[in-house]
Image: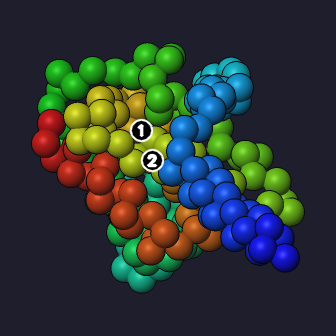
Amino acid sequence: MKNKKKWKEADVVNRTKSIAMSFFGPRPPKVPSTVANPLPIQPTSFIPLKPITPSHTVRPGCVGTTPRNPEPIQGCPIALQLLDSLQKRIDSLPKDTPEAANDHPLAAFSGDPTGSVDDDEDAWEKWDGPLNTLLQKSAEELEKLVVVGQRGLGGFHRFLSYLVSEHKVQGCLLEGKMERLFSAIDRV
């Protein structure tokens, strides 16, 4: 009986030690991840579009126009105000602002946006992640996005106009992202 009691006490002590040692003790080396980061979104082809003109106005209420489409668009007033503010900033960029190249991050948004969202898809669910990837960077990296042209801020504006007018993306969803972009444009 004495031996049995000693073995039980020793077993409890050994189990306590083994639990503590497994938590605080040495661990096997970490195995490196075999999953690679996803590739950035790149356009597969460029569809020639009409040149962007600086004739952008927003009409009172929920109606506005885009540089490519002079017909009034319907949308959230906040979103239309953000689009107007973006266009004004694009128009006020210095003449020596560089034009975007084919491999620029904004070039992914430069093609014709029609059909970029299927009928059964939620546009915000599909494009929130790529927009976050693009616009949630450091201030220095955001300043690199300040480029003009079809593959630059002009094409990006057209893409956002499409989301607002055709898929009714609300301005409150775009506000934070656009404010970061606005501050980068203002710094340039």
Quadrant including the N terminus = bottom right
Q: Residues within 10 Å of mark 1 (few under 14, many from 20)?
A: many
Percent of width and height locating residue 9:
69, 70
Percent of width and height locating residue 59:
38, 73
Q: Is residue 66 above or below residue 187?
A: below
Q: How many marks?
A: 2
Percent of width and height locating residue 68:
51, 45
Q: Is residue 155 above or below residue 81?
A: above
Mark 2 — residue? 157
Contact between labelled residues 2 and 1, with CB atoms less than 8 Å apart: yes
Percent of width and height locating residue 166:
66, 62
- Say which element carries label 1: helix
The one of 92 and 121 positioned closer to us in this rendering? 121
- In the rendered structure, which amino acid carries the disc numbered 2? His
Residue occupying image coordinates x 48% and y 37%: 155
**Residue at the bottom extreme, as displayed:** 61
Quadrant including the C terminus = top left
Relative placement, left or right, of 169 versus 142 is: right
Q: Residues within 10 Å of mark 2 (few under 14, many from 20)?
A: many
Relative placement, left or right, of 59 versus 140 is: right
Residue occupying image coordinates x 59% and y 38%: 27
**Residue at the front extreme, as displayed:** 2
Mark 1 — residue? 154
- In the rendered structure, which amino acid carries the disc numbered 1? Gly
- Say which element carries label 2: helix
Cα separation, mark 1 vs mark 2, equals 5 Å
Q: Is residue 157 above or below residue 2?
A: above
Residue occupying image coordinates x 41% and y 31%: 152
Residue occupying image coordinates x 42% and y 83%: 61
Is residue 50 something one can see in this rendering?
Answer: no
